[in-house]
Amino acid sequence: MKFDEYLAAKKINPAKFKEAEPLQYEEFNQIFSQVHPDSFTQQKLFLINKIRRNYKLLEEVDVKKTTPPKAMRPKIKPLKPKTS
C-alpha cells in the first residue's frame, strides 16, 4: 500500500495535504514506508484526525452505495404461564 492510498483510505486528500504541509507529508511518508500501516495509525492517530479535518477527501455519493433502511423486526412477546 502506498502512502497516498493510505491517506485516501483515511479520507484525507493527499494532494491538498502535500501542497499545504510538504515537510510533514514527507516525514509521514518516510515513516509509513518503514512500518506497517496499522502501526503507523497507532503512532499518529491524533495527528491523522487533525489532518483529516483540515484536508477532507470529498467523494461523490453514489446512489447505489447507499443501503436501504432495515425493516423493523417484530418484538417477541413472552409466553403466558399455563394455569391449571
Image (cartoon, grey):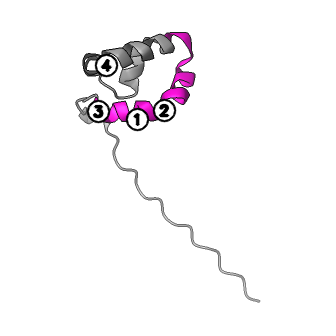
Left or right: 15, with 34 as reference point: left
Left or right: 63, with 37 as reference point: left
The alpha-carbon separation of the residues under discs 4 and 3 comes to: 11 Å
What residue occupies the far left of the structure in this picture? 60
Q: Position of residue 2 (x, y in %)?
A: 43, 11
The residue lying at 32 percent from left, 36 percent from top is 53
**73 vs 51: above or below:** below
Q: Earlier in the sequence, mark 4 or mark 1?
A: 4
Circle 3: residue type: Asn
Are the two marked residues, 4 and 2, in contact with CB atoms closer than 8 angstroms? no
Dot 2 corresponds to which residue? 45
The residue lying at 49 percent from left, 28 percent from top is 44
The alpha-carbon separation of the residues under discs 4 and 2 comes to: 16 Å
The residue lying at 49 percent from left, 15 percent from top is 32
Circle 4: residue type: Pro
Dot 1 corresponds to which residue? 49
Left or right: 2, with 67 as reference point: right
- Of 71 and 23, the residue lying toward us: 23
The residue lying at 56 percent from left, 15 percent from top is 35
State which quadrant residue 8 falls in: top left
Dot 3 corresponds to which residue? 54
The alpha-carbon separation of the residues under discs 2 and 3 comes to: 15 Å
Are the two marked residues, 4 and 3, in contact with CB atoms closer than 8 angstroms? no
Tag 3's secondary structure? helix
Q: Position of residue 55 (x, y in %)?
A: 28, 29
What residue occupies the far front of the structure in this picture? 23
Circle 2: residue type: Leu
